[in-house]
Image (spheres, rainbow, N blue to C red):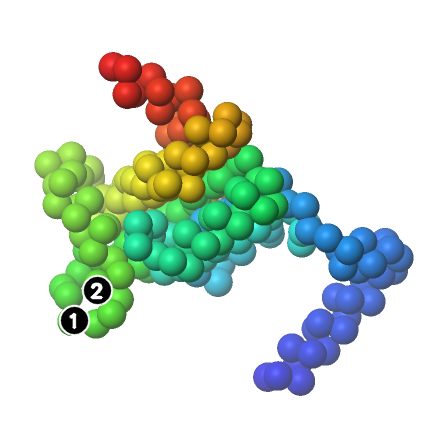
Amino acid sequence: MLSDLFARNRAWSESRKAEEPGYFARLATRQSPEFFWVGCSDSRVPANVVAGLDPGEVFVHRNVANVVHSSDMNLLSALEFAVESLGIREVIVCGHYGCGGVRAATEEMLGSLTDHWLEPIRRLARAYAIDLAQLPDTEARRDRLAELNVIEGVRRIAETPILQRAWGADLPVKVHGLIYGLKDGRLTDLDCTITRASVCDRKDA
């Protein structure tokens, strides 16, 4: 298995150099991504591939079910580095339909670390239980819960001191929520983007 991995890597490397001789030299000098992507660890949803981006164009954090925990130092460190060091102004939380983490959050708890990790999704399921019950089947309810998890993640990122500090410094950072369809390979905007202006509007309301 490992030898096959190395063989694929060599083939990919040679192919990239043939297409663009200076490709790796350019990547090695610096990274200047335009996007910070918070996504699911699911192997079927690699950020740069589904977004049609090359390596170096997106800075990525992934975890099970793309959950945004306000105490996740890994995610927060990556977010801070993205905004303050890399100068990224487009933050994306991306979930996907058919998410195994969302499915696990709707099933019986087994007392594992995964259950603790997925607690925010279980909380969303309880909060939106009436709305979810109106949907026709289990798959539809889980897919809607995946959307709600993204929307909640956008809100949580917007509330971090990192984003509040950036907006206080008049940096034009935007936080977007997207969902990816495994069945069609398409990204969909969930229309939950938060900007400094929208935060100010909400506070003034």
In the rendered view, does 71 fall on the left or right side of 166? left
**At 78% across and 66% down in the image, what residue appears?**
13
In the rendered view, does 83 fall on the left or right side of 21? left
Disc 1 to disc 2: CB gap under 8 Å? yes
- Element class at badge 2: helix
**Label 1 to label 2, Cα distance in Å?**
7 Å
Q: Which mark is residue 110?
A: 1
Provide residue 140's location: percent of width, then percent of height.
26, 43
**At 67% across and 85% down in the image, what residue appears?**
3
Of pointers 1 and 2, the one earlier in the residue sequence: 1
Looking at the picture, which amino acid does disc 1 mark? Leu
Looking at the picture, which amino acid does disc 2 mark? Asp
Q: Which mark is residue 115?
A: 2
Provide residue 173's location: percent of width, then percent of height.
50, 32
Residue 50 visible, this angle:
no
- Residue 2, image quadrant: bottom right
